[in-house]
Image: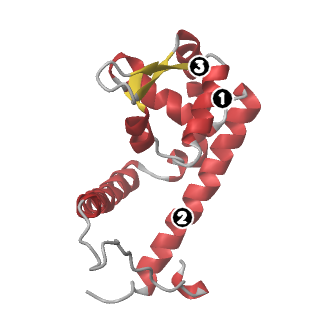
Amino acid sequence: MPARPDPGHLAAWRALLETHAAVTELLARELTAERGLPLKAYDVLLNLAEAPDGRLRMQELSSSVLLSKSGLSRVVDRMEEGGLVRRERSEDDRRGWFAVLTERGRSTLRRAAPVHLRGIQEHFARHLDGEEARVLAAALGRVSAAAGAERDRLALRSASPEPAGDGATWTAVAPAAGPAERR
């Protein structure tokens, strides 16, 4: 395997990143302008609505949100203050907490979904024909599956680190990439 991707693959990578950034920015602006709902909150509401009984452990919620895992607790705090979710202590593990979708959260999601879906259609889907969408979904699905398997493998390995010899665990960090290598 080559040490770096060829120009065609780098161009595809850059296009993916630029498209994701541009489209999610538009979706976020529209949701906020039309429904007063941040895109992060929409992502949380959608994940809870799709979960059994509308509830997920906070750790599961963090794993399932697609847009941003950073600041998730603060987002859930604000959503709880707004009555969109509530937190419940786990019966099995008194240290664990669930985020639970409230009726108000469900109603907010129902009102926001048409805005979000219209944005996906307008800013993404209308630019692809059916075959392009199928090929893109298949290709990105392969990449996502491979990255998920690698992430899981690394998580298992880091769960049982080997001692560094002095009782400490050390992690090697690669030097910062130059501008051409960040793409």
According to the image, label 2 marks what residue? 17
Are the residues flagged by discs 2 and 1 in contact, CB closer than 8 Å? no
Picture coordinates of residue 69 (x, y %)? 51, 47
As rendered, which of 20 and 131 lies closer to the eye? 20
Q: Residue furthest right?
A: 33
In the rendered structure, find residue 78 and report the number of the disc placed on it.
Answer: 1
Q: Is residue 10 left or right of residue 168?
A: right
Q: Mark 3 falls on what kind of element?
A: loop
Question: Does residue 12 sit above or below 94 in this rendering?
Answer: below
Q: Amino acid at mark 1?
A: Arg
Q: Mark 2 falls on what kind of element?
A: helix
According to the image, label 3 marks what residue? 84
Answer with mark 1 or mark 3, whichever residue precedes in sequence.
Answer: 1
Picture coordinates of residue 52 (x, y %)? 32, 21
Cα separation, mark 2 vs mark 1, equals 29 Å
In the rendered structure, find residue 55 and report the number of the disc placed on it.
Answer: none
As rendered, which of 175 and 177 lies closer to the eye? 175
